Image (spheres, rainbow, N blue to C red):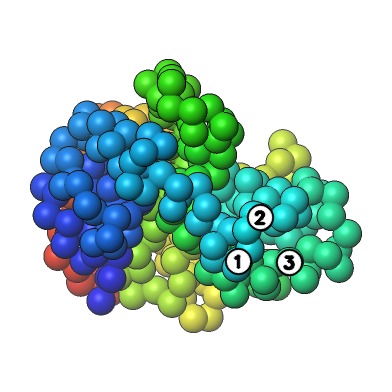
Amino acid sequence: MNELRESIRSLGVADPETAVAVHAVTGGDPALLTTAPPQRFDDTADWLRTGFLTPDGPHFEQAAGRAAALLGETEVDEAADAVLALVVVRPRTAYDLRSLTRLPEEDLLALLPRLEAAGLLAPRANPLEAGNPFWTLTDRLARFHYAVLRPHLPRWRRGYITEKLWTMNRARFDRYVARPEFLDLAREWARDATGAATATRVTVPDPRFRQMRTLELATWDDKGAPIALGTVRWRFRMVERQLKRLRYVKRLLGDPDARLYCVASRFEPAITGDPDPSLRAVTPSELLAAAPEPSP
């Protein structure tokens, strides 16, 4: 059963993007839903300000101190704070974290299991490099803190310019809080739809341009072969160049016999009208609908 989908549906929020945004902060925890969740995405900001963004709100300090509480400390130490601030932006491999934090390898290798044991991070599958997982921030309140509160925490605590701070950080909420929840929902949907063993992200070397290409949606069978590849847009219209990029990365992988998914709320006609039978455009409503039957 797709537990994430069922948890989001249990909120009773009809608009799928609003439901995902609320769940991205609360995880459906009744203790964090002391204020009724919004029914429209435009009302999400007011709901967040009431409960999570003002210093006298019921969940402000809980969010601000979440990482320290999970670690059993009064405050997060400098090394852990640096790692968490990096993984909130996107999942990172240990190599990425070593190069960006400058931590000695032995210190980092001791820190990552500690953060995992605290429930802050989890190693997610890296299909092309099995021994080098993507370390992902998994605790929702900690993610909210590092994405929205931490960059200006003293100013949030003063409570004088909450509206201005929200305007400054709204994009960070969309990108680093709501979007990861949407990606997880898309991956679980794709895993159900394909009967895959693993649903994850994938980074593919591009020798021609000497860079890595990332797809946020990829499912793999238990033999290590790709079943489906996808590109995902949160609250943006998906344009044709993203489909072209998806097909380009598929060719970098050797052009496997894999299905293609474009996941977004809106699409250019070139995507919805594409005749490729292996391509499917998927909306947020479909992600939250009844579990799809695995395709043969």
Decide if residue 203 is in sight here. Answer: no
Among numbered discs 1 and 3, the one appearing first in the sequence = 1
Q: Amino acid at mark 2?
A: Val
| Image quarter of the C terminus | bottom left
Measuring 13% from the left and 40% from the top, which residue is drawn there?
39
Among numbered discs 2 and 1, the one appearing first in the sequence = 1
The residue singled out by tag 2 in the image is 76
Q: Secondary structure at mark 2?
A: loop
Q: Secondary structure at mark 3?
A: helix
- Image spot of residue 136 (x, y percent): 56, 59
Mark 3 to mark 2 CA distance (whole Å): 12 Å
Determine whether 135 is above or below 209 in the image: below
**Label 1 CA crowd tier, 10 Å (few <14, some 14–19, many 20+):** some
Measuring 86% from the left and 68% from the top, which residue is drawn there?
106
Q: Are marks 2 and 1 in contact (CB under 8 Å)?
A: yes
The residue singled out by tag 3 in the image is 111
- Image spot of residue 237 (x, y percent): 31, 30
Q: Are marks 1 and 3 in contact (CB under 8 Å)?
A: no
User: Which quadrant would residue 196 be assigned to in this image?
Assistant: bottom left
Answer with left or right where residue 46 lies relative to residue 140.
Answer: left
| Image quarter of the N terminus | bottom left
Q: Are marks 3 and 2 in contact (CB under 8 Å)?
A: no
Q: Amino acid at mark 3?
A: Leu
Q: Amino acid at mark 1?
A: Leu
The residue singled out by tag 1 in the image is 71
Measuring 83% from the left and 65% from the top, which residue is drawn there?
107
